[in-house]
């Protein structure tokens, strides 16, 4: 988060299960739509916060199962753990807050007197998830927490911390579906969206406590699609996902940015391999027009090719993933302007096919065609990829770019 030196334009604080992640959407389309919107328009100057009831163990399991972005901040175990960045560095200040008047041993002894209660798995028994607060959600989950804990208090703590640092987000949007999300909507001055599939316990809380609050809506769209809907409803920023654009050849943004160029390229690449765009030379010619004639691509295997050679090689990949659950997304697209007309862009590129996940870290150099404006688009000058940890492709030929 050190890269963000000023107040975030938008901070989204979202629950995961049945809010950001739709477990009834086998293709993960709404999540992928949100991913493309966030990386193309918001990642560079906004904050993404996941606030989940899951423990770190179950949270990491979900990330292996679904095409989720990497959040800037993760709030876990129903607001009792706050961590930052890729390394999930704990917020020690929050730990100190929760340690006040908290004795997990006493809580366990007292709760054991209620024989109808069954302990959650060992991975869910977190240091502060046992003066106490009781949160009931999903029709079956009962969490006993420190009085000062919970998703709402964790968010309030973060907002106070940002305000102290002079970095209070310009706008905050909270998103949820169940009872343990209700506290999020109680925080003053935030916008809120209850996704269309929200559970009755949250809708009842809203009817009793916030039905006259114009900053909270009940979306007509499920899960991540409802979050996109709320961004548009409250005019918090762009709300057209690149995945909703079918014709890239004729689609122009008012303000082209490096993040959008990266998202657009890899979305086209996914559609090309799924045969969801026409197999036509104008598409490939358009890609070449966006590349420097002397541009170089370094494959994760170490092989160097010209960018033009890579574009030409795509002909043989057309439709090779037709009818399959093949998806491509990019994560943590962070551009840095290194000269008046040049950007260094770092990001992760992910592919999922047949249940296999592959990922590489990528560094690209993009340059504006006109030194005074990027309205005509950007030119790819260089692209260098490196396999990410254990997620390398077993067959290099299946990873053209």
Image (cartoon, rainbow, N blue to C red):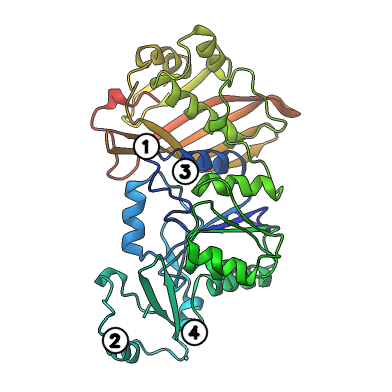
SS for callout 3: helix
Measuring 63% from the left and 72% from the top, which residue is drawn there? 209
Labels 3 and 2: the sequence-earlier one: 3
The circle drawn on residue 386 is 1
Q: How busy is the neighbourhood of tag 4: few (under 14 within 10 Å), some, or many (20 plus)?
A: some
Q: Does residue 182 appear to the left or right of 384 in the view shown?
A: right
Looking at the image, is 85 positioned above or below residue 340?
A: below
Label 4: element kind = loop
- Badge 3: few (under 14), some or many (20 or more) residues near its Cα, within 10 Å? many
- Residue at the limit of the structure toward the right, as seen here: 372
Which comes sooner in the sequence, label 1 or label 4? 4
**Residue 401 falls in image quadrant:** top left
Instruction: Looking at the picture, tell me which residue is in the foreground, 35 or 306.
Output: 35
Q: Distance from label 2 to label 4 (Cα)?
A: 20 Å
State how far apart marks 1 and 2 are (Cα).
54 Å
Q: CA gap, disc 3 to disc 4?
A: 33 Å
Q: Please report whichever mark, 3 or 4, sits nearer to the chain's N-terminal start.
A: 3
Instruction: Identify the disc placed on residue 147.
Output: 4
Q: Is residue 205 visible?
A: yes
Q: Secondary structure at mark 2?
A: loop
**What is the x, y in percent for residue 111?**
32, 86
Q: Nearer the viewer, mark 1 or mark 4?
A: 4
Name the outermost residue toward the top.
Answer: 281
Name the residue: 38% across, 45% down.
24
Secondary structure of the residue carrying numbered label 1: strand
Left-right relation of 296 to 155? left
* Residue 161 placement (x, y as % from top left): 61, 71
Q: Earlier in the sequence, mark 3 or mark 1?
A: 3
Number of marks in the rendered image: 4
Q: Which residue, given by chain and number where applicable, does mark 3 sit on?
A: 31
According to the picture, the residue beneath numbered tag 2 turns out to be 114
């Amino acid at each position: 988060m050190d890269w963000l030196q000023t107040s975030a334009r938008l901070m989204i604080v979202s629950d995961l299960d049945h809010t950001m992640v739709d477990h009834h959407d086998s293709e993960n389309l709404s999540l992928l739509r949100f991913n493309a919107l966030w990386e193309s328009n918001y990642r560079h100057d906004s904050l993404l916060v996941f606030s989940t009831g899951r423990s770190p163990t179950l949270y990491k399991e979900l990330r292996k199962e679904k095409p989720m972005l990497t959040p800037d901040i993760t709030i876990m175990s129903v607001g009792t753990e706050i961590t930052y960045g890729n390394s999930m560095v704990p917020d020690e200040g929050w730990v100190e807050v929760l340690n006040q008047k908290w004795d997990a041993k006493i809580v366990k002894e007292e709760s054991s007197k209620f024989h109808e209660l069954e302990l959650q798995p060992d991975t869910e028994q977190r240091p502060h998830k046992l003066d106490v607060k009781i949160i009931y959600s999903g029709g079956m989950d009962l969490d006993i927490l420190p009085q000062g804990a919970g998703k709402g208090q964790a968010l309030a703590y973060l907002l106070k911390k940002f305000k102290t640092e002079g970095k209070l987000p310009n706008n905050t949007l909270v998103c949820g579906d169940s009872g343990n999300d209700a506290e999020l909507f109680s925080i003053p001055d935030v916008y809120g969206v209850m996704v269309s599939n929200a559970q009755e316990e949250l809708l009842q809380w809203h009817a009793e406590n916030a039905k006259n609050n114009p900053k909270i809506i009940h979306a007509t769209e499920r899960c991540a699609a409802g979050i996109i809907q709320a961004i548009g409803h409250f005019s918090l920023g762009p709300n057209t996902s690149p995945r909703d654009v079918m014709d890239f050849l004729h689609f122009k943004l008012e303000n082209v940015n490096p993040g959008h160029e990266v998202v657009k390229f890899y979305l086209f690449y996914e559609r090309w391999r799924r045969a969801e765009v026409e197999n036509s030379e104008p598409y490939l010619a358009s890609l070449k027009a966006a590349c420097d004639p002397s541009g170089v691509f370094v494959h994760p295997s170490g092989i160097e090719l010209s960018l033009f050679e890579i574009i030409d090689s795509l002909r043989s990949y057309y439709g090779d993933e037709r009818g399959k659950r093949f998806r491509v997304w990019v994560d943590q697209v962070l551009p840095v302007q290194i000269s008046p007309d040049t950007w260094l862009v770092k990001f992760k590129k992910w592919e999922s096919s047949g249940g296999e996940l592959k990922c590489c870290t990528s560094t690209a150099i993009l340059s504006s065609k006109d030194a005074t404006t990027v309205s005509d688009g950007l030119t790819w000058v260089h692209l260098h990829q490196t396999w990410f940890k254990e997620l390398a492709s077993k067959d290099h030929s299946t990873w053209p770019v």
